Every structure is written in C-alpha cells, then in structure tokens.
Image: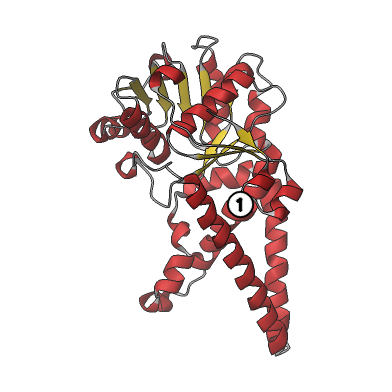
Amino acid sequence: MNRSIEPRKNIAVSKVGREHWRIKISVNNFHSAEQIRLKKVAILGVGLLGGSFGLAIRSRFPNVIVAGYSRSPQSRELAIKTGAITQASGNPKLVCESANLVIVATPVDSIVSMVIEASKWLDSDALIMDLGSTKKLIVDSIESDSFASKLFVGAHPIAGGENSGAMHAKPELFRQRTVILTPTPITDSRKLDQARQIWNSFESFVVEMTPGEHDDVFASISHVPHIIAAAMASTLPDHCQYLVGDGWLSTTRIASGDPTMWTAISMANQKAILKSLDSFTGGLGEFYEAISKGDSGRIFEIFRRAKACRDSALGLYNRRNQTNGT
C-alpha cells in the first residue's frame, strides 16, 4: 500500500524543515508492472539520469519497451549498447509514439519545450515527468499550456554525480535516494499517484514540496555548493596543483560537473541562488573579520557551529537512508 505520512512522524525530517514547508513522504512498497501498467517508456535525453532511469525500468519491468531520444547518434548508440533503452531515434515524435510514460532528462533550459512538444503526441492517459534540478520556472511554464499541464508531474531525483553520459548510468542509481516531486494545485492527482508508484518501485524515498520551495532548498544544498566548488577550483594557483590532497579534491569534486548543464541551472534558478550566495558571502565575511582581528574565540565558535550543523545533517541523511531501507 502506498501512503503518505506527516513529516513529524518520520525521523528524517528535522524540526526546522517542518517549520519551512509541508512535506509528504511516500512509504516505499514495490509495485508490479501490471499495477503501474507501463506499456512503453520514452526517454528524451539518454545521459546519466535518463540512461539510469531506462536501466531501472528494464531491470524491474523487463517486458516494457524503452525508447530513447538523443540528437547525437553516438549517444543513441551508447544507450543501446549499455542496455538503457531497447530502441532509439533522433526523432522525438517517433520515440514518444504510443508511450504512456515520458521522461524528459534533457538540460533544464530545454525541458519546457520538450514537455510541451511531447504532450502533443500522447494520449490523455500518459504521464510526463522531468528530471531537472530546478523547478519553479519549468513548472510555471508547462502549466501555462492547457494540455501539457494535465500530463505533467515535476520530479527531481537526488542522484548522479560529476560524471555524465550513458556510460556512467546504473540501474540502482535511484535506490534509497531521495526523489522530490513538485505537485501544484492543478496537478492531476492520478498522475501524481502514478509518479509516486514508479519511484517507489525503484525503492526511492519520495518527498513532495512546491516548486518554489524546491528551488529555495536546492539553491542552498546543491546549486550554491557547486558554484563554491567551482570558485575554489578556478582560483587555485597553477603552482599549487601538484600538491593538492584529498581535502581539496573532495571539496572540489563536484566542480568536475558538466559546465553546460550547470550554466543552465544557474540561469534557471537565479533568484534563489543569489539569495543563498548572499548568505554564504556573509559567512565568509564573518570568518574574514574574525581572522583579521585575531579573534580565536570567534573563529573557534564559527568552526564549532559548522561542525554541529554538518554532523546534524549527516545524521539525518544516514537515518533517512536506514529508514528507507527497512
């Protein structure tokens, strides 16, 4: 049975989180292909996330057709070779034909046009989900289209990494990972339930919040950390590169992400990113002032607060995964 519980009943949702947004958490339970009634899945964009979605579908629902679209013949060939899809085309209309689930896994600046175009080729019982890491601009734009809005549920799986392409796709990428769904008052409740069931079949931890709340949260925990890592990497003096160790490499790991993708994310979530950057630069300013004054007590207190915050977040992350695995 798929059900929702209030956040205060789940150890993974902090008091601070509860005070900022209402979260619905879907309890995982496996759903069969017959229950979900998948016939054909179309994946528009067969890179890391799209390819992993295809592998996850094929591992759980082996009789379902999985068709993939990419403009690049090399990407299509690679997705077929890795087993992420069963057929491929450079024509998205052909890929979407007869599909009752469409996954749009393109860069965020092309998701809206892809979703609206795909909706024209689908029956009314089809479901469209995106996998983009920004939501408000995407959801607002799609909901301005009367037909696409009836088929669409925004989704953001918190999975992936600095590597891109179907060669890095994994069938278990979404297992025990958080997936954010961003329904609005006009989201079709049946489509939302279908989306929950599909992600639950991957053993994902499903959380729901509004598109605006999503963008505020992920500016702080994803987008700005990436910008910070990129700034650290780009300002390293050349003569220091030979001496870098694990600390610098782990702190800047995500700076190896795709520049095209992260440029699009930065443009799509400008307001929330700038707000989070203001907060971060304030924190840097506090460090700068304390160090310049030689105030060891204040420096210690900043480090103490940072350690407590990080340890708390890590504890919630570990407990959430333990809860999700039971």
* 186 left or right of 2 in image: right
Percent coordinates x, y for residue 271 in the rendering: 71, 47
Percent coordinates x, y for residue 36 in the rendering: 45, 20
Q: Considering only vertical position in the picture, is 109 above or below 238?
A: above
Element at badge 1? loop
Image point (69%, 66%), residue name: 281
Q: Nearer the viewer, residue 315 or 133?
A: 315
Whether residue 72 is visible, yes or no, is no
Residue positioned most to the left: 81
* 162 left or right of 264 in image: left
Percent coordinates x, y for residue 35 in the rendering: 44, 19
Q: Nearer the viewer, residue 76 or 321?
A: 321
Q: Nearer the viewer, residue 150 or 235?
A: 150
Percent coordinates x, y for residue 51 in the rendering: 36, 35
* 197 left or right of 185 in image: left
Q: Which residue is mark 1?
A: 11
Image point (33%, 45%), residue name: 168
Image point (47%, 57%), residue name: 254
Q: Nearer the viewer, residue 231 or 2?
A: 2
Residue positioned most to the right: 19
**Crowding near pointer 1: few (<14 within 10 Å), some, many (20+)?**
few
Q: Considering only vertical position in the picture, is 232 above or below 88?
A: below
Whether residue 278 is visible, yes or no, is yes
- Kindly indicate the quadrant of the structure image that contains residue 85: top left
Query: Which colour assignment does the render follow?
Result: secondary structure
- Counting every numbered tag in the picture gives 1
* 54 left or right of 158 in image: left
Given the image, on which type of amino acid does mark 1 rest? Ile
